[in-house]
Amino acid sequence: MNNMGEKTMLPFMQDVVRIDGLAGSLARSFVADPAFMPEIVLHVGIPTLVEWLGHVSMITLYNALHNLSPVLEPFVDKMENKKEKYL
């Protein structure tokens, strides 16, 4: 992770999980040591790994929606009913 620079390291140091840093870090670990993945699966177990993947998918969805929000903002601002903005 040190080789990936401050953009990757800083969120981890601040206990903030970002999908780009997490995916990059895991990808580099798997490329560097392909036997790493089976070790993790054996250590944590399939149910825990599946649960974790659910959390990672929600982080990915949140990140995608956050990146999409500038595109949607003009449409939301034009809504007349203020309650509709928050549905």
Image (cartoon, rainbow, N blue to C red):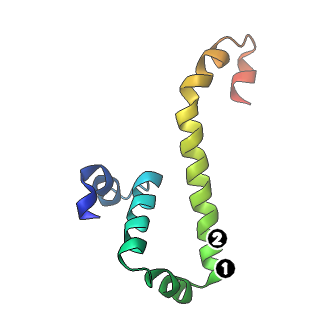
Q: Position of residue 32 (x, y in %)?
A: 35, 75
Q: Which residue shows up at 60% across the image and 61% down it? A: 55
Q: Amino acid at mark 1?
A: Pro
How many labels, in total? 2
Q: Which residue shows up at 53% across the image and 44% down it? A: 63
Is 11 above or below relative to 32?
above
Secondary structure beneath dot 1 equals helix
Q: Position of residue 40 (x, y in %)?
A: 49, 83
* Circle 1 Cα neighbour tier, 10 Å, few/some/many (<14 / 14–19 / ≥20): few
Is 16 above or below relative to 80?
below
Q: Which quarter of the picture shows residue 25?
A: bottom left
Q: Position of residue 56 (x, y in %)?
A: 57, 60
Q: Which residue shows up at 61% across the image and 57% down it? A: 57
Q: Which residue shows up at 69% across the image and 23% down it? A: 85
Q: Which quarter of the picture shows residue 30?
A: bottom left
Residue at numbered disc 2: 51
Check the picture and name the quadrant holding the N terminus.
bottom left
Q: Amino acid at mark 2?
A: Glu
Label 1 near label 2: C-beta < 8 Å?
A: yes
Residue at numbered disc 1: 47
Q: Which mark is residue 65?
A: none
Q: Is residue 16 left or right of residue 74?
A: left
